[in-house]
Amino acid sequence: MNKVFRQCLLALAVAPLASTALAGGAQGTSGKTQTLGAVSGDSSLVGTYHNPASGIYAAKHTSGTVRGELAYGVQLEYGDVQDLFDLVDELSGSLTDEPSGGDGGNGDNGGDNGSDLGSIGDIENPQLEELINRVADEASRIGAVLALVATEGYARGNLGAQLSVLINKNIAGGVLSFDYVASGTYGVVGVADEINFDADAALAALTDAYNLNITDEAQTFDITGGIFLTVDPATQRASVEFDNDSLLLTRGVRLQEFVLGYSRPAFESDAGTLSWGVAPKLIIAGLTDTAVRIGDITDSEKLFEDILDAEFKTDNGVGMNAGVFWDAGFYHLGASVQNLTETEFSFPNIDTSNYSNPEIIRRIEESRTRKLERQLRLEGGLGKNGWNLNAAYDTQSAKDLLGFEYQWASISGGYHSKSWWIPGFRLGYHKNMAGSKLSYMAAGISLFKFFNLDFSLTNSSVTIDGDELPRGADLSFGFNYQF
């Protein structure tokens, strides 16, 4: 089994077992919405998590007093960086927070680390201008790799569960529903400290290199901009190190939502029924984070293990979802607002005393506070004789508590019947219009009347530890019940 995949599964395994994806993770929560997307108008669905106004519609398709669904799911997603963890480990050899020497030519222990720049020519007549050009090339390469790690260098894993209950009884003219949604989600993202290289200043700082003799020990020169050049007269070779605050930020969130939904008809006619719904929710969040400078990393894959040892800070909040739903029999339309109150949470403080770049410190401190961002979702669908076609669209992008951006567009369809063996199957396509821009193909099947199995996969891949893997994969299983 892939080594990185094992690390992610290890992180997921210790998340709360009764713990679905964060709002920005999968295109739907666990269960059949893994394939169908964030829709509420499929008559095979139970929960009203995506649109609390759909409770009236769900009750219309419920024969018992209580109807419910319990589902579990697991998700893994990588950024678009080939061999991400190997790339980070390679970078760490060129970046350091304690350069070897760096006192204008008085260092005596340089040359053990950093990027090899090759020969400097005759030590009594060193080719310093050519050497500076090589430093510039290496600075450009390292800078480009850091930018790539910062924009695409992420990995995240999620383990979740969802319990949905619909009470099919008239309560003050409406119906009640309950959803318990929980997750354990871990992610690592890169933050880049820009490399600023001034070739003229670097060349001026190297004037003492002309005085080196072949019998001298290796010398390290501070050539400005946090760049340190080591020259070894004995081998007549040079290497360069970058004192840089680029880092990997690893975060974990254990989120639990207790959602009580109420929906009621606002208008009824021969054309259809317009319902409204609200869903106040109690949110319990466990949060942890660690920041590790890339130059300090010896094995980036252990970051997922390190986050497990971190202390989780518990933060509570109250939120609200609201929506409207139009049911015209063979078609339906809906609109909902998720996280109406934009509940805010704070991660534990990260010690920034070892960082020197004010911009990096500011970004770390600003990212400490996150909120469940408000988002408007539109949905619609057609259904007849067991067949259905659904669509959902987030009208604007939002970020989850880990800082991942999402804006899902979904289209799905399926069939469900009263058959005991295979009562239903479904297909879906989901695209994140923001953030990762990933697309997922999804499929699901219902078996033996109660059991549901759903799976989705990205159409793009990435190489990790020499193995080609899909950038994203989700698996969900669960069952329905009714009495």
Image: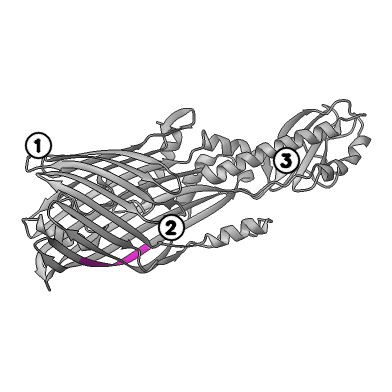
**In the rendering, which numbered label is found on residue 421?**
1
**Cα distance in 3D space between marks 1 and 2:** 40 Å
* Quadrant showing the N terminus: top left
- Please give the residue where the numbered disc 2 appears in the rendered image: 401
- Magenta range: 276-284
Tell me where residue 256 sits by quadrant.
bottom left
Q: Position of residue 284 (x, y in %)?
A: 35, 64
Q: Residue furthest front?
A: 271
Foreground disc of the pair 2, 3: 2
* Quadrant showing the C terminus: bottom left
Estimate how packed mark 3 is, as few (under 14), some (14 to 19) or many (20 or more) residues with alpha carbons within 10 Å. Answer: many
The reply to whether residue 334 is visible in this rendering is: yes
**In the rendering, which numbered label is found on residue 24?**
none
Question: Mark 2: which secondary structure?
Answer: loop
Q: Magenta stretch containing residue 427, yes or no?
A: no
The amino acid sitting under disc 3 is: Glu
Q: Position of residue 280 (x, y in %)?
A: 28, 68
Q: Main secondary structure of the magenta part?
A: strand
Foreground disc of the pair 1, 3: 1
Q: In the rendered structure, which disc, 2 or 3, sits on the residue that comes first in sequence?
A: 3
Q: In the rendered structure, which disc, 1 or 3, sits on the residue that comes first in sequence?
A: 3
Q: In the rendered structure, which disc, 1 or 2, sits on the residue that comes first in sequence?
A: 2
- Please give the residue where the numbered disc 3 appears in the rendered image: 241
**Cα distance in 3D space between marks 1 and 3:** 64 Å
Estimate how packed mark 2 is, as few (under 14), some (14 to 19) or many (20 or more) residues with alpha carbons within 10 Å. Answer: many
